[in-house]
Amino acid sequence: MAPQLGLLDQEDYRIGNGDLDDKDWKIESTTTTTTTTAQTGAIYGKYVKPLLPWSDLPAPKLRRTAYLDGLRGFAAFIVYWHHQNLWAHDTYELGKVLENSFGYQGKYYFACMHGFRTFFTGGHIAVSVFFIISGYVLSAKPLTLIQAGDTVKLGDNIASALFRRWLRLFLPLIATTFLWMTSWHLFGIWSPAVKAERTWWDELWKWYYEFKNFSFVFRTGGDPWLSYNFHLWSIPVEMKGSIAIYTALLALSRSGKNQRLLSWVALIIYFMWIADGWYGAMFIAGMLLSDLDLLAISGDLPSIITRFEPYKDIIYPVLFTIGIYLSGVPSHSLDVKDLAASPGWGPFMAWFKPQAVFDYKWFYLFWAAIFITVSIPRISALKAFFETRFCQYLGKISFALYLCHGPILWTLGDRLYAAAGFVKETHIQHIPNWVNKLPLSHAGPLGLEPAFLLPNLVILPVTFYIADLATRYIDEPSVRIAQWIYNKSLGRPPQLKV
């Protein structure tokens, strides 16, 4: 059975087209349907259903890896929520508290409690999961061809994928940052998150200058952030990880099964314990999981793994629990001494950090992302959740959501938070008319205050709507453009001379 790629990596990744028929929502039953139930269903179908952006998705026959699409989408939502929390609560220097452990400086907030903080400030584990999933789905088709011994099709597959990868990642980034930058000068909607130039032409030159450096993934210096959307730092990292995947696949395409698996492990060790290449370790780990899953489908797993099969009902819930715990690693500091002093971590956990890793959080997030990703398809309730229509819809718009949520936060979100009472010095300077326009209560648990939640009743739907538009009119066309350019680049196949 050939695996399907994830939504972000397919050539045509629409889940479905057109509206649903009523039969797609009905559940067959042997009981008689009452008039009230029928009326309720009619009201839902006519008035409620059109308002739900994921309601146009048919109930598809889910692919083997559909849960990965849902996981990617939910992770993108976690990134959104992480940035909303830090942006709003930085007003009272609570951003530092949110990114530290439960009990930091004697402060005990529910949002920082072990396990729960992932759902408030889990952006870092979400990015780690992105990289694990990318390694998994990018290698799925090539590994299928390697295991089948079809090296000719493997070469064609990797040539096409590598050619299109930069375009696939950076064309949507170009479009969204260009529109975002142009909107400042066109509509006069400024954001304190960026420093605008005096004219649009000056802005255009600055945008070009920054992008050309940012998009060169082999640069050895300069600022790693793109000031027009600094949340997108992970895009060049995604490109470097993709190159590592395709290079490793080609290099080991003729190796035996055991030699290939041992090579993946050796690369992980190299990237994490010898060189500071934590993102490379995540990509290769995703590829290792993909290789093992394909071998499991064909019944060719190494015996060292199959011997644990009788204990899987215990192993995977434990791994998932450990993964959630590790996903809450304190992320505010780069000094491992601060981790050793953090309640719930201490010197014992800090001792495991490899010498090569500069930013210690990525080592713990590496293990957290692996444990979470490998456990979800083996725990039926979790797998079913990520296969729901809502999560599948999030998966569909995940890349656009990642690209667009920052600009919406820095314009609409910033003004609504200022109006609700989260006031910063920049608000007083740049948008004084919005300051405390509609002050709301700051009572309640951190991250769940009315002054924070109520603005998101506006910010979240707008973000989803813009992400949906960006998916339809920027992201999906970018996939087709990349494929079209690749097709145009192809020459005639060489003719063999007799």
Image: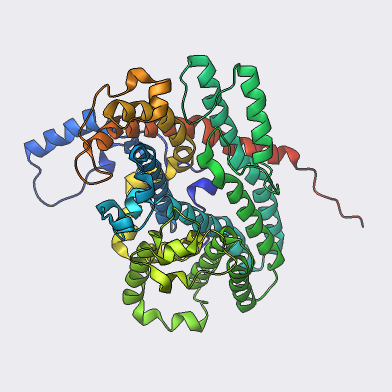
Nearer-the-camera pick, 20 or 250: 250
Estimate the x, y position of residue 438 in percent, counting from the top left: 24, 24
Q: Which residue is at 63% across, 42% downward?
A: 223
Nearer-the-camera pick, 166 or 107: 107
Estimate the x, y position of residue 443 in percent, counting from the top left: 19, 40
Quarter where residue 17 is shown: top left
Estimate the x, y position of residue 178 in percent, counting from the top left: 57, 27
Estimate the x, y position of residue 64 in percent, counting from the top left: 43, 59
The image's colour scheme reads rainbow
Give left or right: position of 328 versus 150: left
Nearer-the-camera pick, 66 or 172: 172
Give left or right: position of 321 versus 368: left
Q: Which residue is at 65% across, 58% downward?
A: 244
Where 356 falls versus 212 (above or below)? Answer: below
Give left or right: position of 345 versus 132: left
Q: Which residue is at 43% across, 36% downward?
A: 405
